[in-house]
Image (spheres, rainbow, N blue to C red):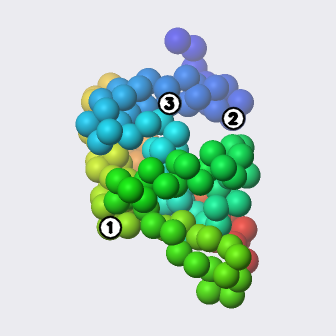
Amino acid sequence: MSAVKSREDLSHSIAQLMPNIIQGVHIGFLAQKNLTHTQFFVLVAVHSQGRPAMRTLSQNLQVSMPTMSGIVERLVQAGYAQRVNHPQDRRQVLVELTPQGRRIITQFQQAAGKRWQQVLLALSPTEVGSFGKIVTKLLQSLQKRESDERL
């Protein structure tokens, strides 16, 4: 494998790595939790967006409102999510994770962390330290961008 020469090269390398990371985690995890991929993606979207409106979820995940309603209904029945009336607009329905839904996200993050531990065995302790600093910087940048977008 050749050395990364640019941001574009690095982006491509990360894009190739991510399916291997995810594949090693999510298939068994979702089967254990009796969740479909789509239901899991909705849980992740709700987690990352806080309390999104059904319409926002529908648009962001590019599915129709009736399809999103069905997905959310199954998540509600499973105890992972709940519908909440919008405080200022009763016509809007918000979706939020229940404690059980938040546990699913946490458990997935832990499983992904274990998968990353296996992958990181290829790095020396010095490389792990450098990579850790880079990941921290990227996380801070993403969090700032998300915070700025909400304003």
The kind of secondary structure element at disc 1 is helix
Give the crowd class for mark 1: few <14, some 14-19, many >=20 residues within 10 Å: few
Q: Are marks 3 and 1 in contact (CB under 8 Å)?
A: no
Q: Position of residue 9 (x, y in %)?
A: 67, 26
Badge nearest the viewer, 3 or 1? 1
- Residue 145 falls in image quadrant: bottom right
Indicate the amino acid at tag 1: Pro
Indicate the amino acid at tag 2: Arg
- Whole-angstrom CA distance, mark 1 to mark 2, is 39 Å
- Residue 151 falls in image quadrant: bottom right
Depth check: 11 or 65 in front? 65
* Left or right of 44 in this view: 65: right
Is residue 29 visible in the rendered structure shown here? no
Depth check: 2 or 63 in front? 63
The kind of secondary structure element at disc 2 is helix
For label 2, the residue is 7
Tell me the residue at 71%/83% (across/down).
89
Image height of 2 relative to 111, above or below: above
Depth check: 115 or 42 in front? 42
Indicate the amino acid at tag 3: Met
| Marks 2 and 3, the one that precedes in the sequence | 2
- Please give the label number shown on residue 99: 1
Q: Position of residue 120 (x, y in %)?
A: 33, 33
